[in-house]
Image (cartoon, rainbow, N blue to C red):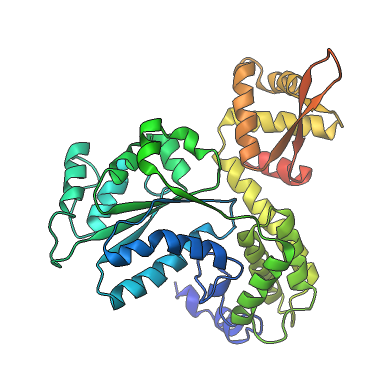
Amino acid sequence: MANIFEDENLIGNRRRNTIFKDKKPLDHRFLPDKLVHRDDQIRDIAKCWVDVLDGVTPSNVTLYGKTGTGKTAASKFAREQLIEAASKENVFVKIEHIRCTDYTTEYQVIAELCNRLGRDVPNRGWTKAEVVNAFRDLFRTNAFGKKLQLIVILDEIDILLDKDGDGILYTLTRTDNVAVLSISNYLDFKNLIKPRVTSSLHDKEIVFPPYGADQLGDILSERAELSFNEDVLEKDVIPLCSAMAAKEEGDARYALDLLKNAGELAFDENAPKVTSEHVKQAKERIEHNKVTEILSTLPLQQQRVLEAILNLTKEGEEITSGKLYDSYMEISKKDAVTYRRIFDFINELELLGIISTNTISRGRGKGRTNIIKLQCDEILLETALFSI
């Protein structure tokens, strides 16, 4: 078979591209020369880290904020700036970014840090004590003849803590010359940390508020200038993407995805411009992909709970936990979980953004009731559920 990438149609489309100049700036992982509307947070990180330039271990830091509020980008931006300043002052500092979705145990994190710092450690097979000792040896002697200062960025730390406990924080905060910057989407993630670790962490907290529509518009305008050819975006495209993303809790990643997908739809159609209609189609595409991806990872019992919610929604029912359980039992027959377990499923589905819950009072003597509502399109959910 001939190389598919040498196909004349593919080559022709690339050469006739009138939409994109460079797609990379539309990726949320792209680090621009300036982070719009995050100067204050970057400066706060710098205040915590500046001591390292005097050979002093810096403060531990925790960044809070919902998805798409610039936490990871700000930490990486501050990292680049500190590395540049440290090189000018001949200070030996390393800043390692660890995605806790990829490294989900203390052993894996410490082994990865060892490997990045030049000490070969296997991914498995050693005891925890052997790995920790190998890590701490790096700070006693090093080939550079300088005192190593290490800052570890633990991105989405709540995932690691939930799976493996707080041992990683205990180890890092009890190691000389090591500071930790933790990133979490959840303000209550410290509930996963024991008091003895909290006291040694002694961190400074920085909150990242959601972006407003105007702020998202500024971010998209900056990225669009780098990504799109001149005059291909109709005037209402960026305001529409910004407004839609502002409704998604100020999520800049969502805004960038909308703009990128809208551009790709225009490109696929050989359209001369990206229009608001392309943005609306992009929203449908993103939501479909998101729901399908989430549902494919859910256990069977959670899928059944969602099916029950969908059925009650289509019937126009006000969904209480009692009605939900009855509907779920009809679907599950004899293969069902307990009523109490359903509450865990409801909480997990709410965290994923598929449903919402609201506690209301029925009046004096009648108690309080949880009302459950779908937060995604019914047809989209039904299609995704029955395609799994």
Residue 337, position in %: x, y? 59, 19
Q: In which quarter of the image is the N terminus?
A: bottom left
Q: Residue at x 17, y 65 (%)?
A: 146
Q: Which residue is drawn at 67% across and 76% down?
A: 221
Q: Give 377 or 348, whichever is nearer the viewer.
A: 348
Q: Up-down: is 107 above or below 32?
A: above
**Which residue, as the protein is rendered here, is positioned at the far top?**
365
Q: Up-down: is 224 above or below 41?
A: below
Q: In which quarter of the image is residue 26?
A: bottom right
Q: In which quarter of the image is residue 37?
A: bottom right
Left or right: residue 265 compared with residue 39:
right
Q: Quadrant of the C terminus?
A: top right
Q: Up-down: is 252 above or below 85?
A: above
Residue 158, position in %: x, y? 47, 42
Residue 164, position in %: x, y? 37, 35
Q: Give 229 or 61, whichever is nearer the viewer.
A: 61
